[in-house]
Image: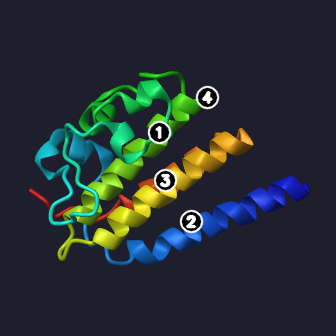
Amino acid sequence: MKHRILLSLGLLLILGTTVPASAHVTEHCTVGFFKNHSQFLNSGTCSKTVFDPTTLVSALFPDVDSCVGSLTILGLLESPTSVCGSGSTFAGAEVILLRQAIARLGNAANSSPPSCDAVYGTINKTNATIDDAIATDNRNELTVLGQFFDSLNQGDCTLQ
């Protein structure tokens, strides 16, 4: 029971520190939008971390499973969840999380004005969550953060 409480508090801390950077994001396009409109899948004027559809997943998220890391960010969006293993494996859970994280990056970079703090915050939180999930052997952390990003990616998408 104590482990569940500590895990829940830890996840709230992780998610809570993501929210301030999210407040500046004005776009809320889904994974499907970016899969079908890859011209918006880029870092825009955010120069600290540069990405486009051909960027390898491992360039942004270096600790992911090697199969997941070898995909481009567009390739990850276009692939089935099972591309590197089922959703019940770490690699499968990483695919689920990273799809939402990549959409979040696109939303932040294409907001008006661009929300570079949300781009960097999303990358940092995602990497910290991946590292913690691996260290604690708890893939559930990946799906919880993926669900949180999914909720942020739902709403008004004005990109065309």
Q: Earlier in the sequence, mark 1 or mark 4?
A: 4
Please give the name of the residue rendered at 27% of the width and 42% of the height, measured from the top-left corner.
Answer: 32
Q: Earlier in the sequence, mark 4 or mark 2?
A: 2
**Residue 130 image point, x, y percent:** 56, 46
Contact (CB < 8 A) between labels 2 and 3?
Answer: no
Residue occupied by mark 1 = 96
Q: Earlier in the sequence, mark 2 or mark 3?
A: 2
Density class for disc 4 (Cα within 10 Å; few <14, some 14-19, many ≥20) is: few
Q: Please tell me whether mark 2 or mark 3 is closer to you in this view.
A: 3
CA separation in Å, label 1 and label 2: 17 Å
Q: Earlier in the sequence, mark 1 or mark 3?
A: 1
Residue occupied by mark 2 = 15
* Quadrant of the rendered image containing residue 72: top left
Q: What's under tag 2, amino acid-wise?
A: Leu
Contact (CB < 8 A) between labels 4 and 3?
Answer: no
Residue occupied by mark 4 = 88
